[in-house]
Image (spheres, rainbow, N blue to C red):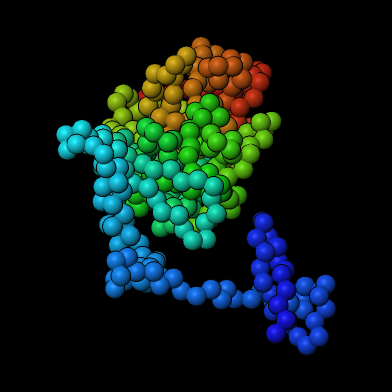
Amino acid sequence: MTIKSCFSDYGFTWSCLPNQENPDPNNPWHWKKADPDCPLNTMQIPKGSTPLHQIFEEYAADQQKWVNDFIPTLEKMLSNGYKDNDLVDAPDQYTGIHCQRQEVNDHSNYYNCIDTDELDQSEAFYLISRLHGRAIEGKPNGYGKVMSFDSNDQKQKWMETKIGNQFINVATGLPLFAGSGRAWTFASTELRIVDPLYGQAIWVPWANVDGGDIGSSIPDPSWKNPTQMFVKLTTKEFQAPLEGPRIKIQSALDGRVIEGKPNGDGIMNTSNENNQNQLWVRKEAKNGIQFINVGTKLPLMIQDVSVWTYTDQRTIEDADNLGMGIYRGWGEVDGQTIGIYKLWYGSIFWFDLIE
């Protein structure tokens, strides 16, 4: 039988067998890798004990058995040459530490461990998309999808680790995966969820439907992309009763009021006394005030602006950029959207706060 050396990869050379009659020595398609033909290692120490190859096979079949035998053996080796009282136990670094095992088909470059003792469900929060108001929900494999917001769904609640910058799902106990990201920080200024290692930001699909998978990509700094903007709403904020008088934000143009949407945006609608989404509570904030919606518990937002100043001219202006104010357009119809624009004289910029 003809045997030749071939398939040299990474410094290793395989023996090959012919794949057909009269093979061309220089044609790799005429050859196939030969199976290793080394004999089994039958070494027995002491003589008459289990052969070495059988021990290897037992450990390969049962990794826990290998761990159970290896650890006391290693401790015995490390203690050789010391008296009984010379060595003491090292600090406990493992109790409460959980390391998510890598999935077979997941080729991520890294996995973080978490200290389960530091997780506090009382500090849990929701991640609500500024695009359509759906929340990120944890999947059984650690990745996320968008679903209609449900404050009682444990899969939509997340906890943040103090070490490792991970968002841990309350229901699954798994860290949030998106694209190549495993660790996250919430950039409150841009409303982005950013991977500090790769600089990628989580995005949601444009489609306004449940079940879409989230991903991550490098954000465009020149564009406030709504698919990469989120509201981080704590469970405490959602559950706590709002204190202060309820108000309506009424347009001077036609008497319609601003109604809060599930994503934090607002639209103009005919006043309805039974609609909680048309009621707001003023909340003091740095440099201004926020209007917290009674129905959604979200602040009134336009793009990434959520802190406002209400002026004597009845305008609602960006607290950090005075002169830019909320306007509602000239359409005197329900569903009219609101936006933010440079102020000029006109009733589309005038609003009354009605208790």
Relative horizontal placement of residue 273, taking residue 316 as reference (left or right)? left
- Image location of residue 339, percent across then percent down: 60, 31
Q: Is residue 211 visible?
A: yes
Relative horizontal placement of residue 73, taking residue 176 as reference (left or right)? left
Q: Measured along the vertical axis of the image, is residue 262 above or below residue 60?
A: above
Q: Measured along the vertical axis of the image, is residue 57 above or below residue 287?
A: below
Relative horizontal placement of residue 190, taking residue 9 as reference (left or right)? left
* In-front residue for pair 65/207: 65
Q: Is residue 271 visible?
A: no
Q: Measured along the vertical axis of the image, is residue 140 above or below residue 251?
A: below
Q: Residue at x 37, y 32 (%)?
A: 162
Q: Residue at x 49, y 61 (%)?
A: 104
- Image location of residue 253, percent across then percent down: 57, 28
List the single residue furthest toward the top.
Answer: 312
List the single residue furthest toward the bottom.
Answer: 21
Q: Residue at x 50, y 45 (%)?
A: 110
Q: Measured along the vertical axis of the image, is residue 42 above or below residue 279?
A: below
- Image quadrant containing the C terminus: top left
Q: Residue at x 58, y 45 (%)?
A: 216
* In-front residue for pair 52/195: 52
- Image location of residue 166, percent across then percent down: 42, 39
* In-front residue for pair 13/254: 13
